[in-house]
Amino acid sequence: MKVRQIRPAHFGLLILAAVFISLVSVHSAKAAPYAAMVIDSRSGEVLHSRNADTRLHPASLTKMMTLYIAFEAVQNGELSMDTKVRISKVAAAEPPSKLGLKSGQRIALRYLVRAAAVKSANDAATAIGEAISGSEAAFARRMNRTAKALGMTNTTFKNAHGLTESGHLSTARDMTTLGRHLLYDYPQYYNLFSRQSTHAGIREVANTNRRFLSNYRGADGIKTGYTRAAGFNLVASAERGNERIIATVFGGRSTATRNAKVAELLDLGFKRAPSRVALRKPTRPAYAGKIGPSGSGDDLAGKTVRTATAVKKSLRPLARPSSAAPTATDTVVASAPSIEDDIKVALQEARSNTASIYQTSVTQTEVVAEAAAPAIVEDLEPQVVTRLSTSGGRHWGINVGRYGSRYAAEKMLLKTALAEMSTLDGSLRKVVKSSRGFDANFMGLTRETADLACRRLQARQVSCFMIGPS
């Protein structure tokens, strides 16, 4: 049998053909579908869209949702930015981009947030999800529940970082919606996305979006993303004068071409957007707390119910004073303080260092309101009652939770006071700061009143425990 010898010239042609086929296949593997969306951030009006509802791989744009939930959790007292998070083996093993966290290491949540927002660190994103929900799977369920509440109807999350996973998909429209909510729902944290670099606890990290932030006038965020399946993605926001535009691109071919396309889209947005338009902020979704083992939400505060003393007997609530039912011709007036006034009072009481909960004699002028059994009066003037209260035996209090900020604690105190007026009337709302957070307390109660208030609040799934005179 004759063996045909391959001439050197033919061999060279075969090599060139193989290289060409390889380059074509690599290019095809990296190519990703293109999608884009441009909106006027002030009104939410769509200024441009292309394939905006096509479900594609979001890559690290996913971390916008991880950070949104982290901000929500801090706002509602689930944890604080100073909470020390223990890094699991799963988080430490995540592939780059990463901060370089070690299994068993403890690090403050604020540094994980910085690393996820600026460095786009996958290990930090996973650690955030585990810190909030216990596991990445549970956190993914919360991500999907939050996405639905935000109106992201074509998004499904499977992880906290955005690495390619079957079924982990979103759209240009949904990611634009999420970017707008980040801007308006948590403006106190938005500056994170514009930092060229930041310290993330163990080292300084540079922003993955620093080129665009440096080169486009008015750009101040938001998030980049890249995987082979997704291509080069970016949700960008820029402000010029009174105008703010958000543009999203999926499927860019490189960092440079993606940035050029986003700049083109932002220019288009500024050109089409009116100079003046009424600001219509998106509606923040209702807080639904943590995700339980079944995937449903826990109680509003996500807290464990604690009791300081055992309940020996169940006290029957005092009967309300009877009054005749109002007729059609009667005028019923309930004079209650407004929410704004009550907030001001709560702030003054919580921040005052001179108020004493053991005052023996306090003269108060109060506005009395009975929502369940309103008083019937002949005129239209609100009824004002002046009374003298004493502190005899009123050395007990109750705690209704620990929160990550003074504002969150004061908000809970006000909400609880309005919901439980019958037992908490006359008590002192007091926020106590400690190294672990801000305790929301009601002080100046009798032991019986504190016990009754706690039992009534616990029946409404509100965390509560009694505070003794000591």
Image (cartoon, helix red, strand yellow):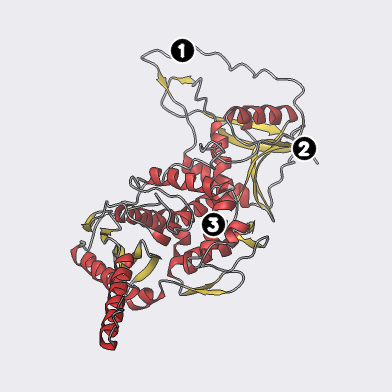
Residue 402 is situated, as x and y percent measured from the top left of the image, at 64, 46
Residue 430 is situated, as x and y percent measured from the top left of the image, at 65, 45
SS of the residue under disc 3? helix
The label shown at residue 341 is none
Say which of marks 2 and 1 sits in front.
2
What residue is pinned by disc 3? Answer: 126
The kind of residue on which mark 2 rests is Gly
Residue 276 is situated, as x and y percent measured from the top left of the image, at 23, 60
Q: Decide: few, some or many residues near mark 2? Use Cα within 10 Å; few <14, some 14-19, many ≥20.
A: some
Image vertical order of residue 186 relative to residue 97, above or below? above
- x 30%, y 58%: residue: 41
- x 46%, y 12%: residue: 325
The kind of residue on which mark 1 rests is Ala
In this rendering, position of residue 394 left or right of residue 5: right
Residue at the left extreme, as displayed:
272
State the CA–CA distance, disc 3 to disc 1.
59 Å
